[in-house]
Image (cartoon, helix red, strand yellow):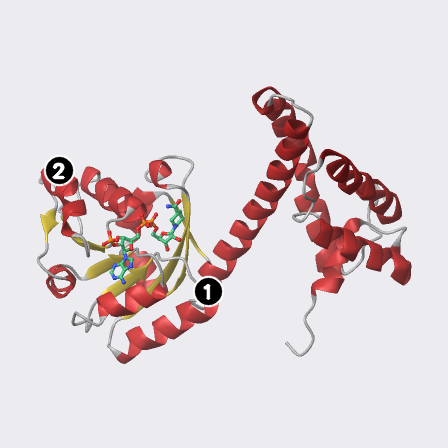
Amino acid sequence: MPEVSKQAVTVLGLGAMGSALAGTLLAAGHPTTVWNRSPGKAHPLVERGAVRAGSAGEAIAASRLVLVCLLDYRSVHEVLDAGTMSGKVLVNLTNGTPAQARELAGWAAEHDADYLDGGIMAVPPMIGGPGAFLLYSGSRAAFDTYREPLDALGESRYLGADPGLAPLHDIALLTGMYGMFIGVLQAFALVRGEGGEVKAFAPMLGRWLTAMSGFTERSADQVDKGDYTIGVVSNLAMQAAGFGNLLAAAADQGVSAELMTPLRALMDRRVADGHGAEDITGVIELLKVSGK
Ligand code: FVH
């Protein structure tokens, strides 16, 4: 059986993530052209079989599929302006806002290019492994045509034609992650504040966070229905009273509670508004910004 040739890919940006993407595509057998502003970062990939382009324009010309993974959208625009995008399929894996993605999709359309936005839900060592998943939105045709190289990077999930959908979900997921980071950092600061060994405490924290992870599904149901009385196990008034102890313990230890105090204020407002018997999820009602 003759070997079916794999689709050629250009990767613009060889930071930690771009290098992982290009290395994974090479390992999957895709002819890969690479370019980076600082050319030295291409060297390990060239040793593995990548073609180093002399300029961003040359890299864009090399393949129909152009993956871009740079620091931000400003750098994306700077780099893409150097090439001819007509007839290309641009897959942008740079972190940004839904508005930035929609603007770039419009720019691509003006330049006669197809556009797919992507959100990478993985850190570089995870790329190509079973834990990585990537969110896509924008051109369905681009997603279907290049499904094979996209799947090589991780599990691919297409969210819809609106290019803003992938960054919306990406940013929402990262928001959840940073919320967890806030809690972990504050918990470690408290344990350290009393001279405890954080490494010994960490497995207990991991176990507790796993036990509490059911909150996401239970609260999602409450939010979708706009009813914060469904399945209440721990009412808000009780939680608000206990939350004060988290802040008081920090103050006793000389640990700042600045990561936590905003939630305290919102819980207290919600209780004062008469929702103490409901779930904490109702705090979301106070996050609505008027005029939007
Ligand atoms: N690394 C991670 O954990 C996360 C995982 C989820 C996705 N993010 C996003 O991926 C984008 C790239 O992140 P990265 O990890 O590759 O970042 P760096 O290693 O810092 O590399 C940045 C690359 O961007 C190039 N660059 C910056 N400014 C410019 C510019 N004005 N013109 C051209 N290129 C530019 C930089 O080039 P150089 O400094 O090597 O010359 C790197 O190639 C990012 O959106 C994450 O949020 C990563």
In which quadrant of the rendered image does the C terminus lie? Answer: bottom right
Question: Percent position (x, y) of residue 229?
Answer: 85, 52
60 and 54: which is toward the camera: 54
Q: Secondary structure at mark 2?
A: loop
115 and 13: which is toward the camera: 13
Residue sitting at x 76%, y 42%: 247
Question: Percent position (x, y) of residue 56?
Answer: 16, 62
Task: Choose top left, top right, bottom left or bottom right for residue 197.
Answer: top right
256 over 278 or under it: above or below: above
Task: Choose top left, top right, bottom left or bottom right for residue 262.
Answer: bottom right
Task: Choose top left, top right, bottom left or bottom right for residue 166.
Answer: bottom left
Kind of residue indicated by mark 2: Arg
Disc 1 to disc 2: CB gap under 8 Å = no
Residue marked by disc 2: 48
In which quadrant of the rendered image does the N terminus lie? Answer: top left
Question: Percent position (x, y) of residue 221?
Answer: 72, 52
Local crowd size for mark 2, using a 10 Å CA cut-off: few (<14), some (14–19), many (≥20): few
35 over 114 or under it: above or below: above
Kind of residue indicated by mark 1: Thr
Residue sitting at x 36%, y 58%: 94
Q: Secondary structure at mark 1?
A: loop
How many tags in the picture? 2
- From where the camera sits, is residue 208 visible? yes
Q: Left or right: where does residue 102 sit relative to residue 192?
A: left
Q: Left or right: where does residue 194 sit relative to residue 243?
A: left
- From where the camera sits, is residue 1 visible? no
Residue sitting at x 14%, y 59%: 59
Residue marked by disc 1: 97
Q: CA distance from mark 1 to mark 2?
A: 34 Å
